[in-house]
Amino acid sequence: MPNRVIPRFMTVLFISIAIAFVLPNVNCKGDRDAETVKVTVEDYARAEQWLLSNIFPKVKNLFVTPHWIGKSDEFWYRRQTKKGTEYVVVDATSGDKKQAFDHKAVADALSQAMDKDIDADNLPFQSFAYNSDRSAITFTVNGVTYTCTLSPSSCSGRRISVPDGVLVSPDGKLGILTKDGNLWLHDMAKGTEKPLTKNGEPHFGYGIYYDGWQASYIPSKRTGKPMVPMESTWSPDSTKVIVTRVDQRHVAEYPILETAPDDGSFRPKVHMVRLPLLGEKPATVEWFVFDIKRDEHRRLELPYDKLLVMQQDILAVRKAWFSSDTKNLYAVAFGDNMESAFLFDIDLATGACRTVIEESLLPRTDLNTTSYSPPNVRVVGDCEEVIWFSQRDGWGHLYLYDGRTGQLKNQITQGEWLVWDIVEVDEAGRRIFFVGGGHEEGNPYYRYLYRVNFDGSSLTLLSPEKADHLITSPWNDVLSLTGATGYEVVSPGGKYVVYNYSRVDQPTETVVRSTDDGSLIATVEKADASDLYEAGWRDPEEFVVKAEDGQTDLYGLMYKPRDFDPPKKYPVIDSQYASPLCAVVPRDFTQALMGVPALVRPACLTELGFVSVVIDARGTTYRSKEFLHHSYGKLHTMMLNDHIAAIKQLAEQHSFLDIDCVGIHGGSFGGWTAFRAMLEFPDFFKVGVSGAGPGSMHNMYLDYHWTAFHGRPQYSDGTQLRPHPTEVPENYMNADGRQQVDNLKGKLLIMMGEIDENVLPGSTLQLVDALIKGDKDFDMLYVPNRPHNFRSAHTIRRVWDYFVRHMHGIDPPKYNIKPF
């Protein structure tokens, strides 16, 4: 289900347990001879080597992250070698490389400072910063910040202690924290604290954590310790800080049961969180500005009644900037249920809010092709102009507005292709650097880097390779399912770009190009995948088929066994994360290794005698507005009609695919899709594994992930608030798994963590209850005391076993995956 940051990278991971119902094998082997199907311990061992913890060490320099040095045209990066790692400086003007510093000298000096042996090939840090004349470097190891002079080499360290729960100001002098609903100011030098508010309380407080789904937040709240204020931002000059005030006093409590406490105690623990379900009034939030110098604070007068309130970010302000003088705050936000989008200009002296831009498109007003990526909105200067993203012409493009009047000046990009991410805005040169898809021939999901002038002229391709360019916004700290990490692609002077590119069958290359015409300056690095291929890696294969409408192209990927034998028949497994908020078919080498954010990796399944396919159906991102919004109101089928059409076409093209034996698996939103497959299309999908999947949507928390994609809840009294505790919204009845349990025919394994705050345990278990009442056979893996991410060696092996047992019709070998 929903997710926020790269450390929460896949809100889709999984489990390990202790409950299982042993059921007889299902006859899902088509015309395959069961006596000839064998899956051995050796096959499992080969599958294990494709787990992420094992596969990534087999490739060196898979992704290069450049770090520009000051305002120069030089950058450093960390590269892997046969012995370990090294730090290299590259001159972007020529591509010339040199070591960033004498590694042995630094290692020797650091050995003395740390009183332990330091290996020059494995220095204990992954990032560093030069001082102004590059005579010294600074880095942090285990909470100690070291400064090492380079000639002669000498290192000294000091521990910078930040108290728990303190958000430190940019100048390092002050910090803020939340205690018992009030905001406090911490003096970093003196260690003293004073309250900035006195009218807060635990469930109606400043910077408090609403009891949303993010499992990393709520345990912090339960401890009773001071907390870093939620959704809070310091101004660059450290004079002001923006803080939320959340009111969840009216929200009913939801119990989360922990039956096997980490502390080893025997009595189960119940954690009560205030969590609004669909049809209930959510928590409310307001923004305040605290002027530290003036010792005053005031409410920011945003049009709160117009804005989206949800359990992911509580208030859908997607990005905020301070003006150069920090007197104003600019904020981009979604309107209620994503049916509109806004840019606000807020006077921090008075709290007054001016709406600069307001746009309303149905069924959603997107600020990027996926809400998991930062909004493609930039304020130019102090809001003299605004670059704005819109799908108003049917494709995702950029528009230029007058920031003073709110009037449209011109459309910047246009055509039957779309903008993915803005990566840099050159205000002085009035140029925009961005990533787009579909403009070049070939795969429309391949990202390319372009620049264009504010007036829409001089659109220039800067990355001509026929491949996927692993570039995203430097702001992209929300979710990365595309193999790209946010960094500064464009050099400080705007003359050069550095990026990584690859395909599923071509390892990554890193290059420097000119921003004038895209001419190649140098190839900086080439990933070394020799160990991977020597281990038996087989590249997946891209394919193009038609959607159920027979007209729309769908792009997918097929993973085949390493010992693939065309005359043989192979069961098919749909590896999916069919969320309408993203597209997950791998397009680059990194993602091909990772597969999709699902229970198990497609490459692992191929070692067990399966062909695994990955499909981006209609209703997913990175295509036209029509393609994107095809899924609206259809979360009960999750665009699986297109998956079925695609697999049938592949079976017509390839006789080795056993169309009579198709399985499906997924986690989180993919777990929901696996449920929908087994209940909506029981004659096609014979075996399903659902990990961390909700059983229905009406019993989940209120969130745009369903209301903006399936519609606002419609109850019998015409309101959006549930009139009776047992009433299901009329438009959500088709997504109520409890009412469809009689449809189940195949083999279904349900996997869940008991303290999952992303997918509520009640939603899953209420479906389980209906299956039991309907006397339906199913298997279940219930993992005590584990959250949304309960993936483990045990749970992976259990999924492998389930598919082998019920799709090959044989008993799996006895095998234990090494813990990771």
Image: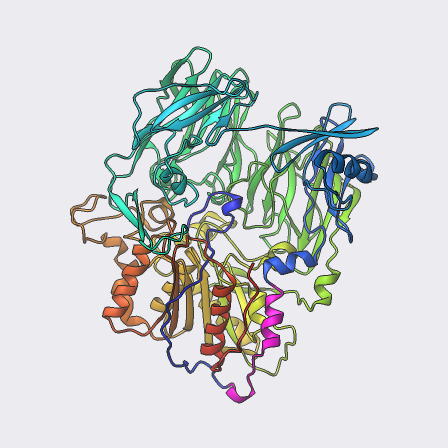
Question: For this view, does 316 lie left or right of residue 656?
Answer: left
Start and end of the magenta stretch? 32-50
Q: Position of residue 174 (x, y in %)?
A: 51, 20
Which residue shows up at 50% across the image and 43% down it? 5
Residue 577 versus residue 160 in the image, above or below: below
Q: What residue do we see at 30% from left, 36% from top?
A: 283
Q: Position of residue 448 (x, y in %)?
A: 64, 46
Image height of 472 relative to 667, above or below: above
- Nearer the observer, 349 or 251: 251
Instruction: Quarter of the image for the C terminus: give it.
Output: bottom right
Closer to the camera in the image, 384 or 771: 771
Count of marks overlaid on the render: 0
Give the image quarter of residue 682: bottom left
Q: Residue placed farthest to the top in the image?
A: 294
In magenta stretch: residue 47: yes
Whether residue 723 can be seen here: yes
Q: Is residue 711 magenta?
A: no
Determine which quarter of the picture holds residue 181: top left
Q: Position of residue 649 (x, y in %)?
A: 51, 71
**Would residue 786 be found to the left or right of residue 145 on screen?**
left
Q: Residue at x 53, y 15 (%)?
A: 325
Vertical side of 20 occupied by 498: above or below: above
Q: Which quadrant of the view contains residue 292?
A: top left
Question: Which of 204 and 123 lies nearest the eye of the viewer?
Answer: 123
Instruction: Note whether residue 402 is visible.
Output: no
Measuring from the top left, give residue 637's x and y in whole percent: 37, 61
